[in-house]
Image (tube, grey):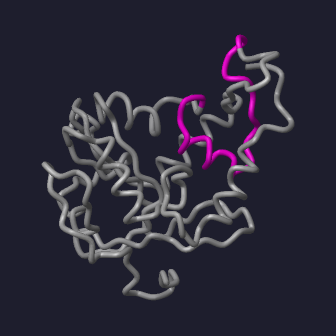
Amino acid sequence: MPKNKSDKDTEPNATNPTFNENDSETFDVNDLEAFTLFDPSKNDKAVIPEEPGNYAILLRHGSKLPDIDVPYIPCIINYAGEPYELIYVGRSQDSLRNREYDKYFTRNNSGQSTFRKSVGAMMDLTQTYRSQGEIGKKNFKTKFIAEDESKLTEWIKNNTLFLFKPFPNPKRIKTAMIQVLDPVLNLEEYPKHSFNIPFRKALKKIRKANNLSPTP
């Protein structure tokens, strides 16, 4: 059974086979040491390659996710000798910099970002239609109003860090990472017996738009 966040030695299952770039079906938590940590408040994004790869989003020390009144068991990792809470993992098929980093940290548009949509919903931000073309559709896409998109971007920059590594087969690696790490904001592909299923169900519910602002 996963340990509680208060346990200093909390780690995801670190007994899985060591990750190998040529066998992307296995992943070990210690493989994260080969990733590069990027601080959006200090570093130049030019150090992030325009290549396919995988990434993880961590909470800064002292930061926490907005509260939705449903507890969860966090994924605590050790990176460079320090503990961090890992909240999301993903992959880019083309550019870690221009597609993934910019999508989360610089573009004020949550319309195509599961991670931004989740955090914004937890912050109780106001949703609107992603575009005029979504109005009237049964299954319409949403983003947040412009003012709240800016608030969300600032929250992400101030509270999270970006961990990345280029890989040629990022899709399969992402699946393996989710299975081992069980990041709370990954809403698909998580372990069948994850202890965070109740949290994810609650999050999916608040992500659904109820009172929409009429102006995209």
Give how far across and how far down residue 132 sits, in percent. 72, 12
Give how far across and how far down residue 91 sits, in percent. 35, 41
Is residue 212 found left or right of 15 in the rendered image? right
- Please tell me whether residue 79 is drawn above or below residue 55 in the rendered image: below
Is residue 5 found left or right of 200 in the rendered image? left
Q: Is residue 150 magenta?
A: no
Q: Quadrant of residue 126?
A: top right
Q: Residue at x 28, y 37 (%)?
A: 45
Is residue 202 found left or right of 214 in the rendered image? left
In this view, the residue farthest toward the right is 211
The magenta-colored residue range is 111-133
Of 53 and 35, nearer the camera is: 53
Q: Quadrant of residue 180?
A: bottom left
In this view, the residue farthest toward the top is 133
> Count the marks: how many?
0
- Please tell me whether residue 36 is drawn above or below residue 14 in the rendered image: above
Q: Quadrant of residue 101?
A: top left
Give how far across and how far down residue 57 sits, in percent. 41, 53
Of 1 and 107, nearer the camera is: 1
Q: Residue at x 30, y 73 (%)?
A: 78
Give how far across and how far down residue 170 sits, in percent. 28, 42
Q: Residue at x 82, y 28 (%)?
A: 213
Q: Please state, as top left, top right, bottom left or bottom right, where the C terminus lies in the image.
A: top right
Q: Residue at x 68, y 66 (%)?
A: 198
- Please tell me whether residue 98 is drawn above or below residue 24 in the rendered image: above
Is residue 65 found left or right of 27 in the rendered image? right
Of 141 and 1, nearer the camera is: 1
